[in-house]
Image: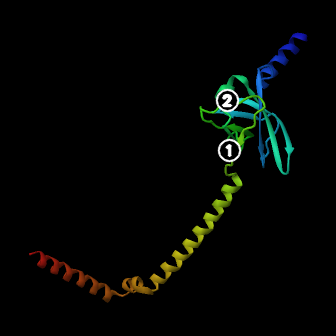
Amino acid sequence: GLVVFVVGVFTLGGQQKSFEKSIHISAVFNDVAGLKKGNDVWFSGVKVGTISEIKFVGIAQVQVKMRVDQATQQYIHRNSGVHIGSDGLIGNKLIVIDDGSPQAPMVQDGDALQVEKLPSTDDILKTLQLNNQNLLAITTDFKLLSHKILQGKGTVGALMADSVMGMQLRHSMSNLQAATSGAAQ
């Protein structure tokens, strides 16, 4: 039983990376969009840590503390940005650390990274709704215009509805061709 217990502790500790050396960094968000303690922290598409604490600070701001593997510390710079992403289309929320410039010093234990403002799903849906309303207005206007043309209203409508005017336009075009060929000779 003792052997099974020890193996279980090391297996779960290895999955949570409890026994690896790590540094703690943080970021302050206005909205954490359902982020939870224990969710993943990613850098360049690789899981590099977990969220260790989420707490309110100030007015309507949430501080997210992250435990990041010390082995990846050299790649994360102080001017790196963080944003909230998701694991798949509707998966768990996670923190994504973006590249900083190599000229900036590497992040240290206790540093706070700058939050990048990305459009949320709600913002994208609002924009899409506005685009749909604009498209509806354009198609309504085009529908009215094409209806008036079919009724013979306006110059284009009159041209399409009146066969005599169409014949006169063809005759004028043939005269124009004859005149330009005569001028060329």
Q: Residue at x 82, y 48 (%)?
A: 61
Compared with 10, 50 (above or below) is below
- Percent of width and height locating residue 133: 62, 68
Q: Of helix, strand and loop, which one carries label 2?
A: loop
* Residue that label 2 marks: 106
Q: Is residue 129 left or right of residue 61?
A: left
- Percent of width and height locating residue 156: 40, 82
Badge 1 crowding class, 10 Å Cα cut-off, few under 14, some 14 to 19, many 20 or more, is: few
Q: Residue at x 81, y 17 (%)?
A: 10
Q: Residue at x 54, y 76 (%)?
A: 141
Farthest residue to the right: give it: 1
Farthest residue to the left: give it: 185
Badge 2 crowding class, 10 Å Cα cut-off, few under 14, some 14 to 19, many 20 or more, is: some
Compared with 87, 156 (above or below) is below
Q: Of helix, strand and loop, which one carries label 1?
A: loop
What amino acid is labelled 2 in the image?
Met
Q: Tell me the quarter of the picture where residue 42 sits.
A: top right
* Residue that label 1 marks: 89
For marks 2 and 1, the one nearer the N-term is: 1
